Image (cartoon, rainbow, N blue to C red):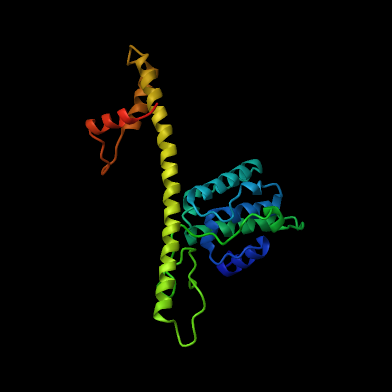
């Protein structure tokens, strides 16, 4: 049996000198990277975002981690697509594994986690999906704690509660807007790559007179993948596609 959530969080916070309150917060990948650094001492912590807020920052953390696994020949798949969603069960299972790995490989040497982070900010990261606080408001940090100041003696005043709810909602909107901006950047980045591949395939096909040539057939298969659609996906009509082409800058 692995350690409980409480035991794992206590060990993690003590080892790294952080203040995580939920297992889900490990899903950003920063803590996993620094656990490995405590063992090996050569993780490029300058590239690790301990307070990752956007999914692309978390993915960058996992890229660092994958490189370490490859360099150290650690034969353990990293389920990035599951961990990055900041779900408790997936991260609990992986944290239990990495704790056992740490127990077997940590040499007992002194480790200064703050110095290794070189003063980089380590605010408790937000989970991808903020949860409702016990008071009914939304916490942008993903914690179940109350947002705002102390509750006055005699209970919260209505105006104070409303202002706290507004601040919490505004914080959530800011976080969601930042997350959306990051997703849009990722979308544009990968779309540009696919567009380059589409142009290259089309140009290469034009050089083949015999479309039965094996290379031409392979290019046609690639083109078929590029143009394939799924149910619910609408292909722009010819007029719209033409407008897009005319406004595109080469």
- Foreground pick, 58 / 39: 58
Q: Is residue 138 visible?
A: no
Query: Which residue is at 62% across, 59% downward?
Result: 99
Using the image, determine if residue 5 lies above or below residue 82: below
Residue sitting nearer the eye, 89 or 149:
149
Q: Residue at x 67, y 65 (%)?
A: 14
Quarter of the image holding residue 190?
Answer: top left
Q: Residue at x 29, y 37 (%)?
A: 229
| Quadrant assignment for the N terminus | bottom right
Which residue is the extreme one toward the top? 209
Up-down relation of residue 26 to residue 224 (above or below): below
Q: In the image, is 97 to the left or to the right of 180?
A: right
Q: Residue 127: in sight, yes or no? A: yes
Q: Position of residue 242 (x, y in %)?
A: 26, 29
Comparing 76 with 148, the one in front is 148
Q: Quadrant of the C terminus?
A: top left
- Residue 125 x, y percent position in the rendering: 54, 59
**Image quadrant where residue 203 sits:** top left
Q: Nearer the viewer, residue 142 or 153?
A: 153
Instruction: Name which residue lies at 49% across and 86% down.
Output: 153
At which x and y percent is residue 167?
44, 67
**In the rendered image, the vertical position of residue 169 relative to residue 46, given as above or below:** below
Is residue 61 found left or right of 81 in the rendered image? right
């Amino acid at each position: 049996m692995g350690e409980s959530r409480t035991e794992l969080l206590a060990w993690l916070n003590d080892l790294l000198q952080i203040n995580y309150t939920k297992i889900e917060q490990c899903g950003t990948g920063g803590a996993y990277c620094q656990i490995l650094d405590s063992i090996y001492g050569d993780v490029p912590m300058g590239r690790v975002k301990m307070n990752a807020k956007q999914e692309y920052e978390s993915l960058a953390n996992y890229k660092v981690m994958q490189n370490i696994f490859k360099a150290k020949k650690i034969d353990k798949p990293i389920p990035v697509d599951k961990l990055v969603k900041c779900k408790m069960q997936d991260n609990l299972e992986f944290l239990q594994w990495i704790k056992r790995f740490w127990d077997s490989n940590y040499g007992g040497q002194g480790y200064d986690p703050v110095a290794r982070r070189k003063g980089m900010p380590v605010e408790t990261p937000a989970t991808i999906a903020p949860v409702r606080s016990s008071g009914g408001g939304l916490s942008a940090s993903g914690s179940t704690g109350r947002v705002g100041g102390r509750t006055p003696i005699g209970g919260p005043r209505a105006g104070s509660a409303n202002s706290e709810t507004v601040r919490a909602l505004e914080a959530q909107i800011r976080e969601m807007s930042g997350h959306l901006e990051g997703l849009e950047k990722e979308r544009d980045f990968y779309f540009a790559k696919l567009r380059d591949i589409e142009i290259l395939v089309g140009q290469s096909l034009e050089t083949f007179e015999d479309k039965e040539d094996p290379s031409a057939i392979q290019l046609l298969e690639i083109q078929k993948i590029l143009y394939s659609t799924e149910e619910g996906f609408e292909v722009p009509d010819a007029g719209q596609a033409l407008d897009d082409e005319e406004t595109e800058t080469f």
